[in-house]
Amino acid sequence: MIEESVRFKGTRDGLNIYAAREADLPDIMDSFLRKLQSGKLFFDGSKVNLIFIGREFEPEEQKQILKLFSRYMKPGTVEFRGNPEPQKEEDLSPEDPSGSFACLEEGMTRFIRGTVRSGQCISYKGNIVVIGDVNPGGELIAGGNILVLGILRGIAQAGADGNVKAVVAAYCLLPTQLRIAGTIARSPEGETTKPSCPEIAYVKENHLFVEPYLPGKGRQDPMLQTNRI
Amino acid sequence: MGEVIVITSGKGGVGKTTTTANIGTALALEGKRTVLIDADIGLRNLDVVMGLENRIVYDLVDVVEGVCRMKQALIRDKRFNCLYLLPAAQTRDKNAVTPAQMQKLCEDLRDQFDFILIDCPAGIEQGFKNAIAGADKAVVVTMPEVSAVRDADRIIGLLASNELTNPQLIINRLRMDMVKRGDMMNIDDTIDILGVDLLGVVPDDEEIIVSSNRGEPVVTGNSSSAGQAYRNIAKRLLGEKIPLLNMDTEETFIDRLRNLFTVKNKKRTWKG
């Protein structure tokens, strides 16, 4: 097996294309073609910023390459970087701390198995997860997030120490009152119907928002569907 | 060995005493040796509902304090030989008895009876603590009403912290016509919140008031639907599998039309 002379890597900024320094042009063009062909449906004429890293290309070669790429996508900004700077390569690897794994650093979690009933109060400085229901009159107070794998009908207070990033999520979110950091919201007056899917509550600019978090919910909404891709 | 069952609710007026009297009488109808203990010291009612008020000489507090023997305080029912009542004192209060004393009292009754039913007072204070002290099992009575269900929920939590897990639920005074109109919580809603096993559902029945006034538990007659419900509950306590009473009245054309046009999904808006 010969090693692939080019490598594609998608990043936030665009498509990084690594070309082996010693490979000759026909070889590279061949690899480009194969890669683009296999990803044809993926690229599908979308606008992509291209960053070529590794091998230096002559202006003539660059033109040729761009011609090939523009058959499959609309090149946005194009940059021929040549030799990769070690520091550039490095910042791709570690996960963005504000990304999906940030929650791992949100402290300890207390698990409650069973129903939190009227008159019971669970208070914890970290996160609280209830595997069961929280009935009206029951109270959860967490320094971090609150997650209820059941029906939340009682009072939930997340981010009790003032953490505005805390959220309250429940399989069925019907609380008497929601508090996140300094923001308080009460449930709508009058008769309410059960939400059909799990919901998550969070604070943004001092307002409390409640929205569904199931991907299934998006299917009912054409707007969400297009945004998801 | 008898089984000690406490009948409790948290909220007052949901029918603990009526339920105790009727389940006890129904168990006696089945031939079980049963004793009813009124733990509502200072506000006794069970003797009135049973029609035994005029036979009280000694009471629970007298037994606990050693003023009399157990046998002297137990009142035999006028209808059933196997049914007894241990009345509460009226001139004392809940602090006249301690949980330990109640525990001993229940133990003493265990070998003489098959069932020992304790009528718990309303509230969660001393009287409640006394009543549940000696119990093996709890029956929670509630009404399909938000405040009663809320209190029942609290009680279920307190029972669990006193090692009385998995209580059984009786939904009392259900009105099917109101449930149909959507004006009353239905059985499923109630169980959904409380998350405990259902022992039975008792329909709202005028007969209950009439029979309480007369001092004759409604299960002794055959006419009332509430009586039938209580007889079924007693049978379920004895381990029989009895389906729930069918309280559905015929659905009319108008009902169906109304259901068709009822707006199912009201918009939920949050107030900040």
Image: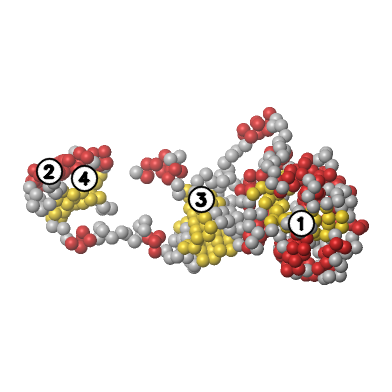
Which mark is on residue A139? none
Q: Are marks 2 and 3 in contact (CB under 8 Å)?
A: no
Residue receiving disc 2: A29
Measure the alpha-carbon separation of dots 2 and 3. Answer: 52 Å
Chain containing the residue with disc 1: B
Q: Determine the image quadrant of residue B65.
A: bottom right
**What is the count of numbered marks?**
4
Q: To which residue does mark 4 refer?
A: A75
Amino acid under disc 1: Ile
The residue lying at 59 percent from left, 47 percent from top is: A192
Q: Same chain, marks 3 and 4?
A: yes
Q: Position of residue A210 (x, y in %)?
A: 50, 52
Image quadrant where one finds the C terminus of chain B: bottom right
Determine which residue is flagged by label 1: B116
The first of marks 2 and 4 along the sequence is 2
Residue A176, percent from left and from top: 59, 55
Query: Which tag, 3 or 4, sits closer to the chain's start?
Result: 4
Badge 3 is on which residue? Answer: A171
**CA gap, disc 2 and disc 4:** 17 Å
Q: Amino acid at mark 3?
A: Tyr
For label 4, the SS is strand
Of residues A28 and B232, which is closer to you in this image? B232
Q: Are marks 2 and 4 in contact (CB under 8 Å)?
A: no
Q: Residues within 10 Å of mark 4 (few under 14, many from 20)?
A: some
Q: Is residue B118 left or right of residue A7?
A: right
Q: Residue at x 86, y 46 (%)?
A: B210
In the image, A21 versus A208, the foreground residue is A21
Q: Residue at x 49, y 54 (%)?
A: A169
Q: Residues within 10 Å of mark 2 (few under 14, many from 20)?
A: some
Looking at the picture, does residue A163 appear above or below residue B33?
A: below
